[in-house]
Amino acid sequence: MDSIPHSWLFKRVSAVCHHGGAGTTAAGLKAGVPSIIVPFSNDQFAWAHRAYDLGVGSKPISKKDLSSNKLADAIKFALTDEIAANAKTLSKKIATEKGARECAKIIVKCLEM
C-alpha cells in the first residue's frame, strides 16, 4: 500500500503515534484519538506540546530521548480513560467549528478595508 489517508485510518485506531506535523496533528484531533508525538523539527514541537497541554496526548518525546520504554509509557498514558475522553470531547468541539468559512470572512473583511 502506497499510502493511507489519515482521515480514514485515525478513526479506526485507539491512538496515533506521529511526528507532530500540523496536518497529522489536526487529523488526530479531528478523529478524537490520543496522540503520542515524537517531534524532530520546526512546528512539530509546538504541536506536540499543545496536544499535551490540551490533555489529548502524552508528553512529547524528543527524538534523541526516544526509547522503547519511553514510547511504551507514553502509549499507556495516552490510552488512559481521561486522555481518551479528552480527545473525544475535543473532536466534538472541532466538528462544530466552521473554520474555513470564518477564515474567508476575515479575508474578505481585510480586502474591503
Image: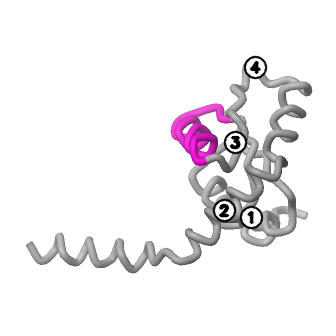
Q: Residue 93: x and y, percent?
A: 56, 69
Give the quadrant of residue 106.
bottom left
Residue identified by numbered label 4: 65
Mark 1 touching mark 3, by CB under 8 A? Answer: no
- Looking at numbered disc 4 in the image, what kind of residue is underneath it? Asp
Magenta region, residue range: 39-54
- Looking at numbered disc 1 in the image, what kind of residue is underneath it? His
Distance between the alpha carbons at the discs numbered 2 and 1 = 6 Å
Quadrant where the C terminus sits is bottom left
Residue identified by numbered label 3: 19
- Looking at numbered disc 2 in the image, what kind of residue is underneath it? Ala
Residue in the image at 61% along x and 59% along y:
26
N-term-proximal mark, 2 vs 4: 2
Mark 2 touching mark 1, by CB under 8 A? Answer: yes
Label 2 neighbourhood size at 10 Å, few (<14), some (14-19), many (20+)?
many
Label 4 neighbourhood size at 10 Å, few (<14), some (14-19), many (20+)?
few
Q: What's the magenta bit mostly, secondary-structure-wise?
A: helix
Residue identified by numbered label 2: 27
Distance between the alpha carbons at the discs numbered 4 and 1 = 26 Å
Quadrant where the N terminus sits is bottom right
User: Which label was assigned to residue 51?
Assistant: none
Mark 2 touching mark 4, by CB under 8 A? Answer: no
Distance between the alpha carbons at the discs numbered 2 and 4 = 25 Å
User: Which label was assigned to residue 6?
Assistant: 1
